[in-house]
Image: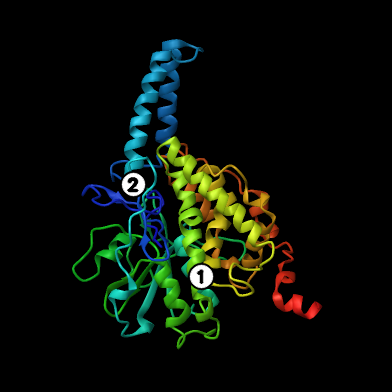
Amino acid sequence: MQPCSSVASVFLAPQGIPPNTTAFGLCRRSSPKSSKCHVIWASPRMSLNPTPQSSNSNSSVLNTLTKLLWGQSLPPGLLIATVRTAWNSTWRLMMSQLAPSDSSGGYSRPASKFRLSRFTLENPKSLHLYVGLPCPWAHRTLIVRSLKGLEEAVAVSVASPGQDGSWEFKYVRGAGRDILKPSLDKANGCKTLKQVYSLRRGGYDGRSTVPMLWDADQKEVICNESYDITELFNSGLNGLARNPGLDLSPPELKGKIEEWNQIIYPNVNNGVYRCGFAQSQEAYESAAGDLFDTLDMLDDHLGSSRYLCGDKLTLVDICLFTTLIRFDLAYNILFKCTKKKLLEYPNLHAYMRDIYQIPKVAATCNFDEIMDGYYKMLFPLNPGGIRPVVPSASQHEQLCRDHGRESLSSAVHASAI
């Protein structure tokens, strides 16, 4: 599975970022056996979000110029064709950095740099977690951390996309229900995530992705692969956890969990990105077909099973949930996953609400940050930066509606016989 390096980086960073550019620091995602995160970059001299004054000034000049050239008529066909060609060329250049592709135009996610197997934890109490709220890969680590009761044992710093797309730290007061919000860097006092990465022994000039697990004693990046981190939180820190009895990957279910991961990761977790970052019609249609065939299958399976592996919530449910909770918010619209809304899948939507209503899970879901991260930072996909309203079915009150999935538990069925 993989990390997210920056919002504009689409949660994946390309290799060899030019030295005079700044990587966006967003998010990272994970696959069962490999982790990768993509980072979108932008030159420090180029602002993705111009100030209102410059925007209004430029707009006024353009309006005056166009009226002088062709009055109220549409622009000449030659101009339209020229602009279209220039924009298509520029778009392909930006997409090649945002989302590396294969020869068919299909999205190819880079692998994670830091894996947990490289390190021996000398002092688990020195761990610090860095996340970004828009990132589904970082989100899964937050959920496992909360469910295991590791909030006090593993402190967290929440980065957010800056004006140039890089992950930066800032305090956000916020209002409303008690949910996670962007924060200052509580471990190192850095202004950006890139600065944190550079503190490790030997330095670092690669992609600065989230989630990232930091060892404060060793001043070292322990891991930036999301699935590795969730497994560590699930079973490797039970001595520090307030809920050590919870096992989200019990030995008897590991085989099923791996089987589901092999289906869900490429077709759903990464599948939505394959749709959104496709650079050819063929690649898009292939990705969309895989995505919705898998969602159809999952909806059918969940009609008779409360969770993917039966009655018990497992890591693979959490991996699926962080994609589903973003589906109608962002993927359906921005990533062209338009065949169906998640709301149109009765079992999948109820399953998502079931997990959302587990104590502590809703507090990890900051919908404003999620939508800002996608719509305002992924410039090649949404040049105007306009953020749509939150769909009514994705609002907190609607997600708290009764899901009725307790009746699918085998224990309930057995007691009714």
Asked which secondary structure carries label 2, the reply is loop
The amino acid sitting under disc 2 is: Pro
Separation of marks 2 and 1 at Cα, in angstroms = 29 Å
User: Which quadrant holds residue 199?
Assistant: bottom left
Q: Is residue 219 above or below residue 30?
A: below
Neighbour tally class for label 2: few under 14, some 14-19, many 20 plus, Cα within 10 Å:
many
Check residue 274 in the rendering and tell me which mark sits there, or answer none. Answer: none
Residue indicated by mark 2: 100
Check the image and name the residue furthest to the bottom: 239
Q: Position of residue 405 (x, y in %)?
A: 71, 67
Q: Is residue 311 above or below residue 66?
A: below
The first of marks 2 and 1 along the sequence is 2
Residue indicated by mark 1: 257
For the point 49% across and 84% down, the residue is: 241
For the point 44% across and 25% down, the residue is: 60
Residue 46 versus residue 327: which sits nearer the camera? Answer: 327
For the point 43% across and 14% down, the residue is: 77
Q: Is residue 117 above or below residue 167?
A: below
Q: Position of residue 265 (x, y in %)?
A: 47, 59
Q: Position of residue 246 (x, y in %)?
A: 55, 82
Residue 259 visible from this viewpoint:
yes
Q: Position of residue 292 (x, y in %)?
A: 57, 48
The amino acid sitting under disc 1 is: Ile
* Left or right side of 405 for 244: left
Residue 249 versus residue 262: which sits nearer the camera? Answer: 262
* Left or right side of 130 for 370: right
Neighbour tally class for label 1: few under 14, some 14-19, many 20 plus, Cα within 10 Å:
many
Check the image and name the residue furthest to the left: 202
Asked which secondary structure carries label 1, the reply is helix
